Image: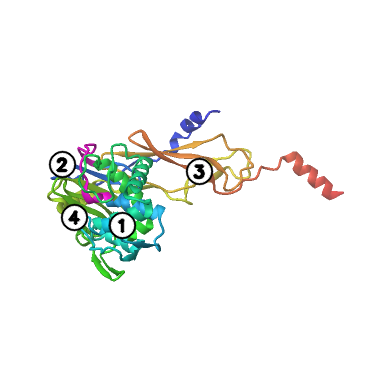
Amino acid sequence: MTRRFLCCTLAALCLYSIFPCRILAVETSAASAILMDADSGRVLYERNADRKMLIASTTKILTALVAIEEGDLHDSVKVSREAAYTEGSAMYLTEGETLTLETLLYGVLLCSGNDAAVAVAQHVGGSVKGFVALMNEKARELGMEHSSFANPNGLDDEQHYSTARDMAKLARAALENETLMRIASTRSVTIGGRTMTNHNKLLHYVDGCLGLKTGYTKAAGRTLVSCAEKNGQRLIAVTLQDGNDWADHQALYEYGFSAYPARTCAVRGQALTQASVSGGVSPTVPLIAGAGFCYPAAETERLTTRICLDEPLRAPVSAGKTVGAAVFCLNGTEIGRVPLVAGRTVMPKVSSALAGLKLELKDE
């Protein structure tokens, strides 16, 4: 019996759900923008999301990610003359002073220090050029297909650009890095003899804002990458060349959380349904989700669950054995799946002939 047949025969177990929510209209002032569900990667709103744009200091999300992955936060970093005299926004480093890599990363993400970014790059990459190579390698690894990086701080350069969609991919990776998010969500800190305040006003304006990065150059305009969480759902907003970015990000989050709330399709360790077992002491066995699955869905959309077994279940069935998958669909298109495991052991029935034999042996 094929998997396809089993899926069809169990179609009666599909869970059809339509969830009520009010769809709100949203628009931004940005030349390019995107709103993405962080966990599923589903795009909830976009405008010119694949247009190659200057990204200014939002570059520093990638700088911090590479530095944390490749460096050691406790390393001592001596500030070079080149770093100390880097143009633009700064944490005001002086040539020859020594700070930890962690302190410099606060300078990169909180006060957007171009000087700190160069100091970090020289230490972790051996040189700015070496570090930029690591940045571009990481970008390719993350699937940022329309991005190119020429420096660690975001100063304007013809070979330095990205897209709203690519920056959202970067933000998804950043969210999985606890150290980066710890720093990026800090409103103010005193470290290494300096007190630094985060430039990201959304940490004050938006309940549940998790941080990330601001940016500005005259050519790029205002750029902003942010993330917010509500009821366990995380959304990422990116706006490029947007003169009203604080308000636009607030509007995007209001829209996303209202129009596309995350719906729980499966909870790890909980039973999704029962499956028939032939030849067992019990006629059924609970099927337990091997992983959790949530997905953002709008009022007009239908989420369904299809139970697919690898093969018909016959006793014995061992508890914890993977026996199939729950396949989740949005309007008929698969959006994800989780493994299903047997929730308990089902032993085979003892045949009547064998039962009689045991009884006779006992009588002797």
In front: label 2 or label 3: 2
Mark 2–mark 1 distance (CA, rounded to whole Å)? 32 Å
Q: Quadrant of residue 15?
A: top left
In the image, what residue type sits under mark 1? Ala
Mark 2–mark 3 distance (CA, rounded to whole Å)? 45 Å
Mark 4–mark 1 distance (CA, rounded to whole Å)? 14 Å
Residue linked to disc 1 = 119
- Describe residue 179's horizontal placement relative to residue 348 as left or right: left
- Describe residue 95's horizontal placement relative to residue 358 as left or right: left
Observer able to see residue 176? no
Name the secondary structure under disc 3: strand
In the image, what residue type sits under mark 3? Leu
Mark 4–mark 2 distance (CA, rounded to whole Å)? 24 Å
Height in image: 206 above or below 173?
below
Tell me where the magenta segment starts and ends, as one range: 44-59
Q: Which circle marks residue 340 in the picture?
A: 3
In front: label 2 or label 1: 1
Residue linked to disc 2 = 31
Q: Do tag 3 and tag 4 residues touch (Cβ < 8 Å)?
A: no
The x, y position of residue 296, in whole percent, is 31, 45
The x, y position of residue 31, in whole percent, is 15, 41
